[in-house]
Amino acid sequence: MGAEPDFLRRVPLFRDLDTDALAAVARACIERRYERGQVIFSEEETGQTMYLVVSGRVKVSRWLASGREVILAFHPAGDYFGEMALIDGETEPATVTAVTSSVILSLGRARFLELLQRQPFALALLRELCKRCRDAWKQVELLTHEAAESRVRMVLHQLCGQSGIETPAGTRIDVPITHRELASIAGVSRETVTRVLGLLVEQKVVQVGDGRRLVIPEPERLIDAPCFD
């Protein structure tokens, strides 16, 4: 089964393609369904495919020698992953797992390389790769902080920028995220995340809104604290 052109048009990489090119991509896509916890792409696999999230949510993570999982990113519906391995032919240094039941489209390397010859696609890809490089730099900056509180604060600040939605109460982090997932991103224990979030709620830096979504009245307060001195 192929993809719906209307869905592809909402993905930044494809939105500027002409109708015929978009239809060709849609026909080349293969749809698969994954249950919660099912691995979509592992570190050992050589990248021959790009993936697009139609519905659900996936996480990108690495397992350290200690056995601890470090979450590098989440990809919600409308996002994609695996494109870098198609460019350089290297393996993807991460495992991608479905966080919820998900529908994923796959696009093979041959079609991807054809798209690279089209200027709108190539420019869109460069913009997206630049954004991901900046996100990676932020992750490196986060891990240079020794204080657990500062790490949790920085993760929340990054999530405000990546998936925040402005509301009258402040910036709502519009993805469901557990304490364990926050801990894996920040490189701290789940107990530490619970303690720090409790402190931030007490200080009114963070609020818990509908559906347990976190709301940040003033995101800059997250990174304006003594723990960063």
Image: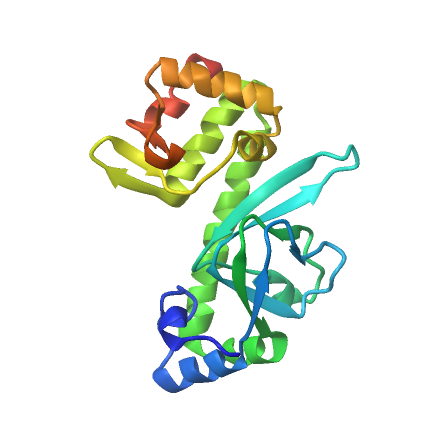
Q: Position of residue 77 (x, y in %)?
A: 44, 57
Residue 169: quarter of image: top left
The correct choice, above or below, for 74 with respect to 213 in the image is below
Residue reaching furthest to the bottom: 20
Name the one closer to the observer, 81 or 124.
81
* Colour theme: rainbow
Residue at 78 percent across and 32 percent down: it is 66
Residue reaching furthest to the left: 168
Task: Report how many numbered discs are placed on residues in the image.
Answer: 0
Name the one closer to the observer, 102 or 52.
102
Residue at 42 percent across and 42 percent down: it is 175
Residue 10: quarter of image: bottom left
Q: Position of residue 26 (x, y in %)?
A: 46, 79
Q: Position of residue 225 (x, y in %)?
A: 40, 16
131 horizontally vs 174: left or right: right
94 horizontally vs 203: left or right: right
Residue at 39 percent across and 64 percent down: it is 12
Residue 195 in sight here: yes
Residue 228 in sight here: no
The correct choice, above or below, for 224 with respect to 7 in the image is above
16 horizontally vs 229: left or right: left
29 horizontally vs 165: left or right: right
Residue at 64 percent across and 38 percent down: it is 70
